[in-house]
Image (spheres, rainbow, N blue to C red):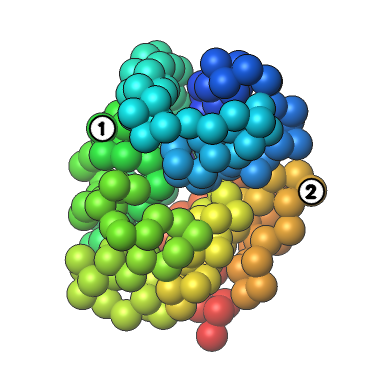
Amino acid sequence: MVDTEPLWGIATYELSEKLGRRITPTIRETTLGGTFANTLKVCAEYAGVSVTDAEAAVLREEMYRRMEGLLSENLEPHPGLRGLLGALRDEGVPMLVTTNTVRRLADISIAAVGEEFFSGSVAGDEVKSPKPAPDMYLKAAGIVGVEPGDCLVFEDSTSGMTAGAAAGCRVIGLPAAGQTPPAGVRVFGELFGAGGFSGLDVADVRAAYESFR
């Protein structure tokens, strides 16, 4: 809904530099859509250092504070998204946000899109195992009282697509260039074309949902 990855990239590169060695763009790709714990592990291993629990807590707080500033200043919903969300809401379609981001940061992103569109949300610090585990999508389905197989998921990270598929949801992926979506995931561009969310309506989403049958 909003492109936070460039902002996470800034904070992730800064984290790696604090640990003594700036990660490469290829290494950075392994942290996309992941948790802070995974990002710290990747950066520490690349730098060849060990991090104590106390040091990890300090680094996590510093990164979250940095992200609060970046998110508050730079987020814009993708063109056409708010119109589509409004149309789906008016049709009575319950929608939830699921994100590996912790609640304190997730709320900033949700507010940038519009809290009024959503029935709820599940943040990364509210499940036992975040994406790519299916927990988050299983919880989201339970919140609205439907089976995961009746849920349509839009995901732009490999970990998120994997999580949705593992939960048994119908998953539409928006993979980055060169990224191969997991098995069973339909690609957004193949379903809707290259125009993004602009021009999409409820009928388009309904047809995509039915295409999984």
Residue drawn where x is 56% and y is 49% of the image:
156
Provide the secondary structure element on which disc 2 rests.
loop
Kind of residue at badge 1: Arg
Q: Is residue 73 above or below residue 151?
A: above
Q: Is residue 85 above or below residue 17?
A: below
**Disc 1 + disc 2, Cβ < 8 Å:** no
CA distance for labels 1 and 2 = 32 Å
Is residue 209 in sight in this rendering? no
In the figure, residue 58 lies in which quadrant? top left
Provide the secondary structure element on which disc 1 rests.
helix
Q: Is residue 31 left or right of residue 37?
A: right
Residue density around tag 1, few if under 14, some if 14–19, many if 20 or more, within 10 Å: few
Q: Provide residue 34's location: percent of width, then percent of height.
A: 50, 45
Quadrant showing the N terminus: top left
Residue under pointer 2: 178
Q: Is residue 94 or residue 97 the one in the foreground?
A: 97
Quadrant showing the C terminus: bottom right
Q: Provide residue 62's location: percent of width, then percent of height.
A: 38, 18
Residue under pointer 1: 104
Kind of residue at badge 2: Gly
Q: Is residue 57 or residue 134 the one in the foreground?
A: 57
